[in-house]
Every structure is written in structure tokens, then in C-alpha cells.
Image: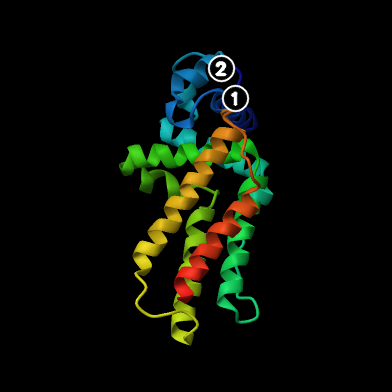
Amino acid sequence: MPKVTEKYKLGKKIMLIDCAIEVVKRKPLYEMSMLDVINEAKISKGGIYLYFNDIDQLIIETINKIADDYESFQDYPHAELIDNDIPKTILNAFVNLGSFIESSPGLLAKIQFELMVYISNNPEKQQIILPNLKLKSFGQQFMDDISNFINIGIEDGAIRDGIDLALLMQNISMFIDGVVNRTVFSKVYHGDLLEYHLEDIFEQFAKMIVQYILK
């Protein structure tokens, strides 16, 4: 029997990941099973376990391959303070986030949304999957940036005292989640088209936030 080379093993593994990506294009990430990939690859049921220990490892490597294919969209850039102007900075950060989400490729937006659903339904998977992903959470980075700007504004007196920051950030998070979900359904699941550009939607919301924190 000929010896199986490392090059052959790597090629086989890449082929299986490509098959997993094809599966994810057709069905939600959180519904993908090893059997789905086995059927897509047309291999024996036991063959896939020579390359992946379980579905979590396959999910990790599938997402990382998609992230590599869309490398320029992996990392959302940190927002920066503009002219020491907190309101202007916050408005700009929201508009940039809207533009980033709108320009993200459909498949990348799909797996980000479906990964969030998978982790929410299986919280024990968080520490198994998230530390091993190349794909960064742009949502969390954005929230950290906005929280930081608001704290700077409070210290500098540009923003009023007495704001319930935790509640404010929760409302911002709910707004972003809602827009992202609507965008994913529109771009990926063929839902209703968005009536406005995301930059405009985020700018209007940011203006309400700025009006609230400056009162």
C-alpha cells in the first residue's frame, strides 16, 4: 500500500473544508453536520475523522478559511478621536460601522450572524470556538471604542454626568444587532431590500445618541 504523504493529507483536508463551505452556503452554519460534509465530499463516514476530531473543529477551520478568503474584512479598524471632538468622533464611528457592514461580503456576514446564533444556543462552545478564530468581533471592538469615547467625554466635561452607561451601551448593542440581522436576511436570505443606506441609518441613530449624552 503506498504511503500517504503530508501533502496528500493537507490537500484532502482543504477539500473537506471547501465542501463544508459549500454546505454553509446552502444551510445555516449552526445546522451543518459532519454527515452534510461527508455527503458533499462523497467519502466514507469514517474518513472525515482522520482530519477533524469533531464538528467544532470543522466549524473553526471552515470559518478561518472563509476569513482568509476575505482577509481585508477580518478586522474592523479602531475608531480614532477626531479633533478632540467627542460628538463628531461618535458620529463618524457610527457612519463608518454602517459602511463596513454594508460593504461586507454576503457569506462573511452570514457566518458572523450564524456563529452568534450558534454560540447563543450553545454557550459552552464559546471558549472552544472563539479563541481559535481568525475572524475578529468587529461589533465588540466598536462597542469598546464608543464606551471609551463616552468615558473620555465625561472626564473632559463634554458629556453630562449621570448617564447610565451600561443601559446606553445595551441599547446601542440592540440597535446594531437588529440592523445586522436585517441586513443579513436581506443580503443572504433574500429578504426585503433595505430602504436606506446603512450609513444614513447609523448616522441618524448616532445623532440621537449624541443629543442624549449632551443634554
Q: Is residue 81 left or right of residue 169?
A: right
| Front residue of this view, candidates 168 and 24 | 168
> In which image quadrant can residue 164 be found?
bottom left
Tell me if residue 174 comes above or below residue 20 in the rendering. Answer: below
Name the kind of residue labelled 2 in the image: Glu
* Residue 113 position within the rendered picture, expressed as x and y whole percent measured from the top left: 49, 40
Tell me if residue 148 comes above or below residue 18 in the rendering. Answer: below
Q: How many marks?
A: 2
> In which image quadrant can residue 195 be found?
top right
The residue that mark 1 highlights is: 22
Which badge, 2 or 1, comes first in the chain's sequence? 1
Circle 2/circle 1 CB separation < 8 Å: yes
The residue drawn where x is 56% and y is 42% is 64
The residue that mark 2 highlights is: 40
* Residue 140 position within the rendered picture, expressed as x and y whole percent measured from the top left: 47, 57
Q: Quadrant of the C terminus?
A: bottom left
Instruction: Please tell me how crowded label 2 is: few (under 14), some (14-19), or many (20+) other residues with Cα within 10 Å.
Output: some
The residue drawn where x is 41% and y is 57% is 171
* Residue 114 position within the rendered picture, expressed as x and y whole percent measured from the top left: 47, 36
Q: Is residue 42 left or right of residue 68?
A: left
